[in-house]
Amino acid sequence: MRVFDTKTKKVAYAKQTQAVKGKNKSNCPLCAVGDNANKARIYDFDEMDADHVAAWSKGGDSSAKNCQMLCITHNRAKGNR
């Protein structure tokens, strides 16, 4: 299956959000790097999309270990990378 189920997405969201709590970093790993306006923004769950760390088209599966939550902008920009 290509998509992540809701439970997997919520677990990834909670894990990422907890990891950056109090560190002035975004829970979107791509926003958190570099120097952009959203580098410290904590996105709500519904402002993020599940992303395959290893692209589905390149053999990545839809497991919890291959799931990360990205802000919608970064997820759409990432595409097939």
Image (cartoon, helix red, strand yellow):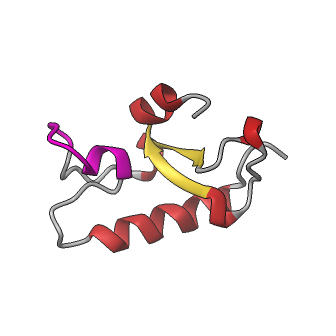
Q: Main secondary structure of the magenta part?
A: loop
Left or right: residue 19 compared with residue 64? left
User: Residue at point 46% right, 68% down?
Assistant: 14
Q: Which residues are magenta?
A: 28-38
Residue 30 falls within the magenta-colored stretch: yes
Q: Residue furthest right?
A: 1
User: Residue at point 45% right, 52% down?
Assistant: 45
Left or right: residue 53 compared with residue 31? right
Q: Tell me residue 41's x, y (percent).
A: 22, 49
Rendered position, 51 above or below 66: above
Residue 25 falls within the magenta-colored stretch: no
Looking at the image, which is closer to me, 58 or 7?
Answer: 58
Q: Tell me residue 39's x, y (percent).
A: 20, 47
Left or right: residue 78 compared with residue 16? right
Q: Quadrant of residue 58?
A: top right
Q: Tell me residue 37's x, y (percent).
A: 14, 37
Looking at the image, which is closer to me, 61 or 41?
Answer: 61
Disc tally is 0
**Quadrant of the image containing the C terminus:** top right
User: Residue at point 20% right, 41% down?
Assistant: 38
Q: Tell me residue 12's x, y (percent).
A: 53, 64
